[in-house]
Image: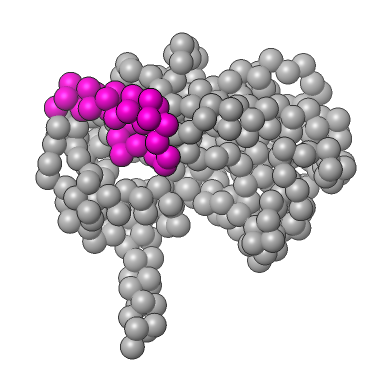
Amino acid sequence: MKVFVTGGSGFLGKQLLLRLREGNYKVSALARSSNSSKVVKELGATAIAGDLSEIENWESCLSNVDVVIHCAAPVEFWGPWEKFEKEIVEATSALAKAASRQGVKRFIYISSESVLQDKDPLLDIAESHPYPKTPNSHYGKAKMLAEKVLQSLNLPLEIIILRPTFIWGPGSSAIETIRDKAAAGQFLWIDQGHAEFEAVHVDNVVASILCALTNGQDKEVYFVTDHERTSVRQFFEDLFRAINVPLPTKSLPAPVAKVAASVVESIWRIAKLKGNPPLSRFELSFVMMPRRYSTLKAQSELKYNPVVSRKTGLESLRRQLGKSLSLFSGLTQ
């Protein structure tokens, strides 16, 4: 089977390319820069130089591909809407149409749980749960619109939409950011961190993608999680212990935090300040909004089940930290 991947040099993409190589798939991957090209080649894939904003320049490289896996997206939650619209909504639509023109049979889109995140708790939610009027981040809104566009296309192309929760594991920039905030004393619990929380190890996301190469129904959406119930506090305390970060103790009541986030966002917009605000509604909902999703559909139709437990994943993070410390020690001797 011939597979084409976007976002191959990213956190999820690198793990995916490794597994595809192990499975003896013939893999090519889009590379936006010389560094991305180098990473892709080192992982055993053929690098296709190009950008999602200029698909017409390399579209012909899809002519003999069986499956396109679209992982690429700006994983950001603040900035001008136009950026998210162009790089997520428009790019996804254009790529699916190009794949269809070139005879690709299946298109796997990596979406996000953020398409459903607004204000209300998301407990015992199945894929049929309606979208909110407007998700609480441009990223979530763009992912939502991309899902809708894909489901509206009338093409001879099977489209599978995977909706992972918070993706974690070795090499995650999100975990590095959270670690730095916690180490600096800037990580706060909301209502003591008792909200239910969903996460999925990167290896489990990869496993779901491999399942979707042949399983799943056209235009259907599938939640992908670790299948392990937890709370915000339990998940992150276990994570902080694994990466040797002091456990946060400060907590804010949700009403106070909501007001603070609204004020901070307003200041950033009105003053047109650069960079991300120190607190946003999306970041707040990440540690405050209760989430619990049903994965029965993914189990029955995709035949997906996690391949890495949370305990094993945390042990892997702990080992990675040990290697990093050993390397640092060697460089400073």
Tell me the quarter of the picture where residue 266 sits.
top left
State the image coordinates of residue 168 (x, y, percent, origin top left). 41, 47
State left or right for residue 101 relative to residue 281.
Answer: right
State left or right for residue 147 relative to residue 163.
Answer: right
Overall secondary structure of the magenta section: helix
Q: Which of 277 and 70 is in front in this view?
A: 277
Tell me the quarter of the picture where residue 189 sits.
top left
State left or right for residue 206 relative to residue 310.
Answer: right
Q: Which of 242 and 183 is in front in this view?
A: 183
What residue sits 68% from the left and 56% below the top?
33
State the image coordinates of residue 217 (x, y, percent, origin top left). 65, 24
261 magenta-colored: yes
**Above or below — where is 216 with respect to 239?**
above
319 magenta-colored: no
State the image coordinates of residue 103 (x, y, percent, origin top left). 86, 33
**Above or below — where is 263 with respect to 213?**
above
What residue sits 39% from the left and 82% below the top?
331
| Image quarter in which the C terminus is found | bottom left
Q: Which of 79 and 63 is in front in this view?
A: 79
Q: What stretch is highlighted in magenta?
A: 253-282
Residue 218: in sight, yes or no? yes
**Above or below — where is 280 with respect to 323?**
above
State left or right for residue 256 relative to residue 220.
Answer: left
